Image (cartoon, rainbow, N blue to C red):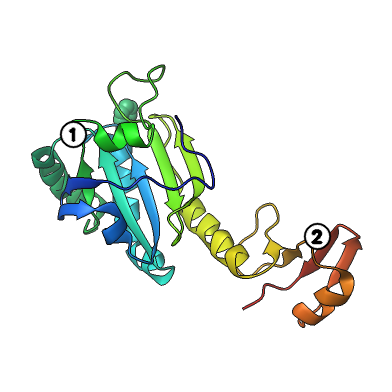
Amino acid sequence: MSLRLGDVAPDFTASTTEGEINFYQYLGDSWGVLFSHPADYTPVCTTELGRTALLKDEFAKRNVKVLAVSVDPLDKHLGWKNDINETQNCTVDFPIIADPEKKVANLYDMIHPNASETFTVRSLFVIGPDKKIKLTLTYPASTGRNFFEVLRVLDSLQLTAKHSVSTPADWNKGDDVIIANTINNEDAEKRFPKGVKHVKPYLRYTPQPE
Ligand code: BEZ
């Protein structure tokens, strides 16, 4: 069964490049990003894990813990990590799960047999502090993901978890947001003191709340 938005993210214990990790314990009260890549010692994956390492401070600022996973064994991950650090000018210090038995891959439905019988596709899950799935992404092996987009979605998810707003197309942190239609005009004026812009009864903007 594939995992859907709002489902509880399954817990697991796995061997990783940072030692044995229990997923829930590792996440604690943080947000999480769990993402699979098809294979070690491959070019696109090398750039993806390098980019993730370079964005370490951005993930930390947002209270997000990241974990990568593939079906390669631990010794291969450890060797490849040196190549990632060397070629991407980074220090990978987030866990890379070794999943040769495909335990995590199957739990999260990361193997799509019509794409590849053996390798994980580029799946990505954002998990909230309540351990529920907030975002799923699936990319083919040939297309590297945009990790700035992952940060952008995290900004939206964290903002909309706190305020009765949603974020419009192409929104970036600091841009105006949309007031939820569950809030009437009178309440909107009170809740959003920075101002309410009425475009249509169902489309009202306000500057991003703090
Ligand atoms: C890559 O990371 O470049 C890659 C991995 C598996 C299949 C195709 C490309």
How many numbered marks, from 0 up? Answer: 2
In the rendered structure, which amino acid carries the disc numbered 1?
A: Asp
The amino acid pointed to by label 2 is Asn
Mark toward the start of the polypeptide (2 vs 1): 1
State the image coordinates of residue 79 (x, y, percent, origin top left). 10, 43
> Where ligand 1 lies, by image quadrant?
top left
Whether the residue carrying mark 1 lies under 8 Å from ligand 1 is answered with no
Image quadrant for the C terminus?
bottom right
Q: Is residue 197 left or right of residue 117?
A: right
Residue displayed at 33% across by 64% down = 28
Q: Position of residue 8 (x, y in %)?
A: 45, 48
- Rendered residue at 32%/45% (across/down): 47
Left or right of residue 164: residue 81: left
Quarter of the image for residue 77 reads top left
Name the residue carrying label 1.
72
Tell me the element at label 1: loop
Image point (62%, 63%), residue name: 160
In the rendered image, which residue does mark 2 sit on?
181
Q: Is mark 2 within 8 Å of ligand 1?
A: no
